[in-house]
Every structure is written in structure tokens, then in C-alpha cells.
Image (cartoon, rainbow, N blue to C red):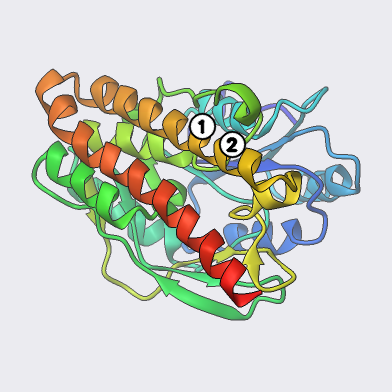
Amino acid sequence: MKRSDVEQTPIVSIGMPVYNDEIYIRKALDSLLTQTFHDFEIIISDNASTDNTGAVCQEYVARDHRVHYICQPRNLGPSANFTYLLAHARCEYFMWAASDDIWHPDFLKILVEALQKKPQSALSFAPYAWIDDKGDLLKIKSADYSGGSAFTRLLKICWLYDDGCFYGLFRRKFVADFSFATWWGINASNPVNNAYPLLCYALAAGEFIFCKVDPLWQNRIHLRKGGVNVRAAYTDIRRTNLFFNYLNFILLKINVLYSCADAVYRGCQSRITTVLILPALSLRCLYDCLYRIMQKYRTSLDS
């Protein structure tokens, strides 16, 4: 279904990337369509699903004029699909929505009101919850990146390193020109950690609003045997050689470091801020690499 050029532009564009998620997407769409804030559109970009996802989405297109569905002719990869949705948004505010998550009915209302009160703000967010495949609560998460300067905000994300606010509400003009980085080498098709450059870009460009309320978003964490997050353990799943595995991880972190530094400069256009935050970004990279070694060491001791 194509959007009409004559219809009134809503206030919020919600971009939902999806691939083979017929199990959870109904719950995700239902929780978005029952928001107390009604002035939004949902753009679903189906990354060439091979299951019944397309049919489910078409049901919602027929049911609600705010839902628009695009089926990509081929799988673009996760990062390109996220970029596609941002490029096709048209509203003042924008958010990505994972097809397996759940939102509180007041999610949009609270975050839109927060952004409307502070025109210089780039992003608003609130506490959120991790849930498992069954919907049971795993953990309450919270990361406040607010600060009067870009350096303060960026320093906080280097320290807290929580990318949950990637699924917050953006003032679209602050991120409209952003396109996701393509990782180098063996990480080229891997979306893991790809949220951080975007967040560095947004935090460098504008203010962050943290709404101190109860959790408004449930982020579904898919676990494999042993309770390990599937996305966090992707290298263990793909490779059995631990040495190659670790080199893969280091390359990923170098990719993240470079992309975040580049995003900071593009976001604030300040060489001084970029130079000042570079040691913190580098320490974050080093910490993650060393922490990975400690994880492997502890695992070997336990076994």
C-alpha cells in the first residue's frame, strides 16, 4: 500500500524492519496501534521474508490506514533495511520498532511531549525492560545520557554503553542524513553494535531527554541454551575456532571505534569535541576486548 501524497502528514513515522517474524509481529503491531497518541504511521520493510510474515502484515494494512507495507525484492541485510526505513520516513519524529517487541500504550505520548518541550533535543527515551521469548521479565534497564554539552553526553554513553535508546524517539532532522556503517571484512554483514555510531551521531548533534517514568518498552531478548543472548553470542555460533573468533571480535570493535569517532565529528562538526572524546571511545574498545578474554577464561574454568 502506497502512501497518498494528498493525505495529511502525521507527526511520527515508525519504521519496522522485519524478516521471518510471523510469531511475534502481531503483538508488536497491536501494541503500536493501541497507542494513546494516534497521529503516526507505521512503515514495515520486509527484508524478503520466506515465512508468513507478509500475509500477516497485509492483514494490518487492510485493517488500519496508518500501516504501510513494503516487501523488498531481495534481502538487503539488517543495516541497509534500517537505513531504508529512515530514508523513507517523512514526519517530524521518527523511531525504529523491532518486530518482536512490545510498547506501553503511553510510549509515544510521553516521548513526543518530551521532545515538543525542548526543540533543541535530538532524542527522548525512558526506562525499558528485557523480556524473554515467553514475555517474562528478565531485567529493568535504564541509561540517562542527558547533559548540557555533546562531550558530557558522549562520555556517558562510553561509560554506560547501553544502546537501548536506539529504539527511542528521534527528532528526524537530527538523524535524517545518517546511514549505517558497513563493517569491514568478516563483519561486513553483521549488525551487532551498529546502533552506537547512530547514537554518537545523535548525542553529538542535540540534547537527550530521559523521561523518568515506569518502563515504557519491552525489548525481547532471544536466548539460546544456557541463557545466553543469541545476538551477543553470534561469534560463538558462527565459528568454533576461538582464536579466529576473538580476532573477529577485535575487528568488530575497531569498526565500532572508527565509526563512532566519525559519527561524533559529523554530528557536532567539532574537531575539538571529537579529539576530546576519542580517548574515552578507545578505552571503551579496549575494555570490551579485555572483557571478552575474561569471559572466555571464566568459561574455561567453569568447564
Which residue lies at the image location 28% right of the left edge and 20% below the top edge?
266
Q: CA distance from mark 1 to mark 2?
A: 5 Å
Residue drawn 56% across and 80% down? 137
Depth check: 303 or 62 in front? 303
Q: Quadrant of the N terminus?
A: top right
Q: Position of residue 223 (x, y in %)?
A: 68, 67
Which mark identifies residue 251?
A: 1
**Residue at x-position 63% and y-position 52%:** 231
Quadrant housing the C terminus: bottom right
Residue 283 versus residue 274: which sits nearer the camera? 283
Please indicate whether residue 9 sits to the left or right of residue 48 in the image: left
Q: Which residue position holds label 2? A: 248
Q: Secondary structure at mark 1?
A: helix
Q: What amino acid does circle 1 point to? A: Leu
Task: Tell me: 216 left or right of 276.
Answer: right
Residue type, numbered disc 2: Asn
